[in-house]
Image (cartoon, rainbow, N blue to C red):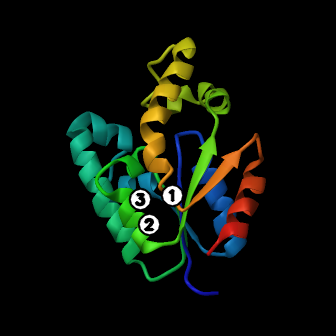
Amino acid sequence: MKEVKIVLVGYMGSGKTTVGRIVANHLNVNFLDLDAFIEEGEKMSIASIFKEKGEIYFRKKEIEYLNKVFLKDESFVLSLGGGTPCFGNNMEFINSKTPNSFYLNVGINELEERLVKEKEHRPMISHLADDKLTEFIGMHLFERSYFYNKAHHKIKSNRNTPTEIAEMIVNKLV
């Protein structure tokens, strides 16, 4: 198989990590989570980086680590943090490096159902009351969808399982 680099973008809770692992397993390639890669490199959690060094520091590091990932001469599936595509020229950079960028497009109601169950693990929403979640997600998605929609492929989730979404991705590989 020729080298293939697959990048998954989308809002938090859209299934990038879960689906990414399935695609990587199916193709027998490495799976990388950009946030985990940054945490390993910086020796601290994303939440700690934000708290101790600030978002600007984090976004600069994010670009740096994204570049490092693409220096690898190997196939991989990469899941990005929800904000990664929205900063710097990250989407343009990704799209210049691979024809296989995928936006996992999940509706607001489906995202809310997923995220309400894992709020305490999500620093961005852990402080929100449940009844404020829909509005927050909607506003955020509105801001970010411009960047997400720059991905080469859009995968619309209509309550599909992660395996079904992974199959959709594999079937669209360039």
Q: For the residue labelled by badge 2, is the local secondary structure a helix, a strand or a loop?
A: helix
Residue that carries the numbered disc 1 in the rendered image: 151
Residue 28 in sight here? yes
Relative to 64, is 97 above or below?
A: below
Quadrant of the image occupied by residue 6: bottom right
> Looking at the image, which residue is at 53% across and 40% down?
12
Rounded to the nearest angstrom, the CA distance separating label 3 from label 1 is: 21 Å
Rounded to the nearest angstrom, the CA distance separating label 1 from label 2 is: 7 Å
Q: For the residue labelled by badge 1, is the local secondary structure a helix, a strand or a loop?
A: loop
Residue that carries the numbered disc 2 in the rendered image: 95
- Mark 3 or 2: in front is 2
Q: Considering depth in this image, is 58 or 151 the residue closer to the camera?
A: 151
Expressed as whole percent of the image width and height from the top left, the position of residue 58 reads: 28, 47
Q: Please state which amino acid type lies under the numbered disc 2.
A: Asn
Relative to 72, is 21 above or below?
A: above
> Looking at the image, which residue is at 70% across and 45% down?
157
Q: Please state which amino acid type lies under the numbered disc 1.
A: Ala
Q: Considering depth in this image, is 82 or 156 the residue closer to the camera?
A: 156
- Compared across the picture, whether 45 is left or right of 61 comes to right
> Looking at the image, which residue is at 27% across and 55% down?
61
Residue 42 in sight here? no
Sequence-wise, the earlier of marks 1 and 2 is 2
Residue that carries the numbered disc 3 in the rendered image: 37
- Compared across the picture, whether 66 is left or right of 120 comes to left
Kindly check if marks 1 and 2 are in contact, taking CB atoms under 8 A apart as contact. Answer: yes
Expressed as whole percent of the image width and height from the top left, the position of residue 63 reads: 30, 58
> Looking at the image, which residue is at 65% across and 32% down?
114
Relative to 19, is 115 above or below?
A: above
Expressed as whole percent of the image width and height from the top left, the position of residue 97 reads: 42, 73
Q: Please state which amino acid type lies under the numbered disc 3.
A: Phe
